[in-house]
Amino acid sequence: MEVTTVVIAGAGSRGRLTYAPYSKHYPGEMKLVAAAEKIPERLREIRQDYGLSEERCFSTVEEMFAQPKMADMAFICTQDADHVRHACLALEKGYDLLLEKPVAGDVDECRRLLQKADELGRSVTVCHVLRYAPFYQKLKKLLEEGAVGQIISIQASENVGYWHQAHSFVRGNWRNSRETSPMILQKCCHDMDLLVWLTDSRCRRISSMGSRSHFREENAPEGAPRYCMEGCPVKEQCPYDAEKIYVTDEVTGYDAKGAGWLQNAVMVQPTREDLLETLRTSPYGRCVYRCDNDVVDNQSLTLEMENGVTVGFHMCGLNRNNYRAIHIMGTKGDITGNLEEEVLVLHRFGGGEETLRIDPRETASGHSGGDYGMLHDMFEARRQGRATLTSLRQSLESHYMALAAEQSRLSGGKMIDLREFTGGN
């Protein structure tokens, strides 16, 4: 089997902690040969963990792509606003790409990258990993087999845990749409992509409403300081207290499970003592009511697909757990499912009920097994000369939907025609 060589641009949570380890688990498929990362501690860690030479470790992505091509593929795992620029640099050097979502926060930028990839004849796989999750693979198979007949309508939701909302979209990297992208794009382009895939249809029109209802300055408790560790008077009662979320909480805290992705986002190689000290000044230690966030904490969409399927989708960041739920209604039955529970329930009209549970062994990697499922298929597709399930052209449909939804929200729920929104493409 031919091993695919890879360079990683951006050694953060996805690049360093999700994709790089694949080369250790499956050395017959992938070999990491170089990395670029602006945070020295992260660059040093990936160099040591993967035996990279100092000459193959770069402090900027631009520096790495200024070198002669040194691998088959480049993984673009930098911040949202840099994706297209870094992807274009890699394409021009002759790399095929794995590109983190979202591709871009602007329709024109999405098109620019697609045009560049087509002109150069390069392959771009977008990290819409949920298509590869066994839960959605099983759901897709049931629909293709006609388990519910013709799909008529779908209700779907992404329920973001309160701690995840606070970490990523209030305190963290995706809190401000001017710096990154709207939350409906950053978090829910997965969901939009799934709707296109499950219905086998593009979206015809969309409307949306939503807001930043809770995480606002005026909702700060009286006397709450800028940082949770500065003697907040409501620390014990506040579920968003940074010390709770990152250190002491029985589900998300360091005390319960050690250093997970939350703690690794705060700092490299976290210890309990270092976390407590870092939270005193880190952006992740800020009061959730006193941040510079502007993205929504709730948003609802109404969609009509080109094949007539209607969809109601809801996202909210005020839940105990992270989970996606779906209800697909057809002419011969309906299916309900909960991704966190890995359970699908099929009801056949006039017949019985069938419960299908996903084997836990299939969901060992992140995104319910989707992360490694995507990587495996991508490497196989490369060897076989075929497209992946999440090619750039296919994946951009989800971006157009999310960006149109945001325009609708900002316009008071105005109905947006997708053909008009994308200029007829």
Image (cartoon, rainbow, N blue to C red):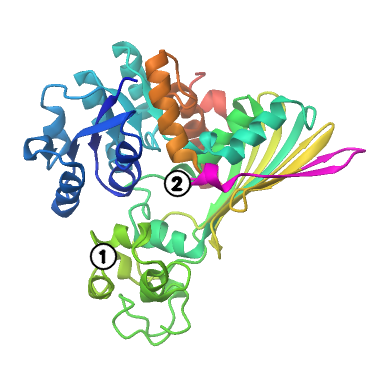
**163 displayed left or right of 355:** left
Residue 414 bears which disc, if any? Answer: none
Between residue 114 and residue 355, name the one nearer to us: 355
How far across and down, in percent of the image, does residue 321 sit?
55, 61
Which residue is labeled 2 in the image? 366
Q: Earlier in the sequence, mark 2 or mark 1?
A: 1
**241 displayed left or right of 194:** left
Q: Residue at x 14, y 50 (%)?
A: 44
Asked if one can make out residue 407 in the rendered structure from this viewpoint, the answer is no
**268 displayed left or right of 17:** left
Q: Secondary structure at mark 1?
A: loop
Neighbor class of circle 1 (other Cα within 10 Å; few <14, some 14-19, many 20+) is: some
- Decide whether residue 59 is among the magenta residues: no
- Decide whether residue 359 is among the magenta residues: yes
Asked if one can make out residue 90 in the rendered structure from this viewpoint, the answer is yes
Between residue 25 and residue 339, name the one nearer to us: 25
How far across and down, in percent of the image, does residue 170 sit?
40, 61
How far across and down, in percent of the image, does residue 226 sit?
31, 75
Q: Secondary structure at mark 2?
A: loop
Q: Residue at x 42, y 22 (%)?
A: 380
How far across and down, in percent of the image, does residue 416 sit?
58, 34
Q: Is residue 182 above or below residue 147?
A: below
Q: Residue at x 20, y 42 (%)?
A: 50
Q: Residue at x 43, y 76 (%)?
A: 220
Quarter of the view holding residue 234? bottom left
Q: Which residues are magenta?
A: 346-367
Query: Identity of the amino acid at label 1?
Result: Pro
Which residue is labeled 1 in the image? 270
**Residue placed furthest toward the right:** 350
Q: For the residues marked 2 and 1, what is the alpha-carbon distance in whole angstroms?
A: 21 Å
Query: Identity of the amino acid at label 2?
Result: Gly
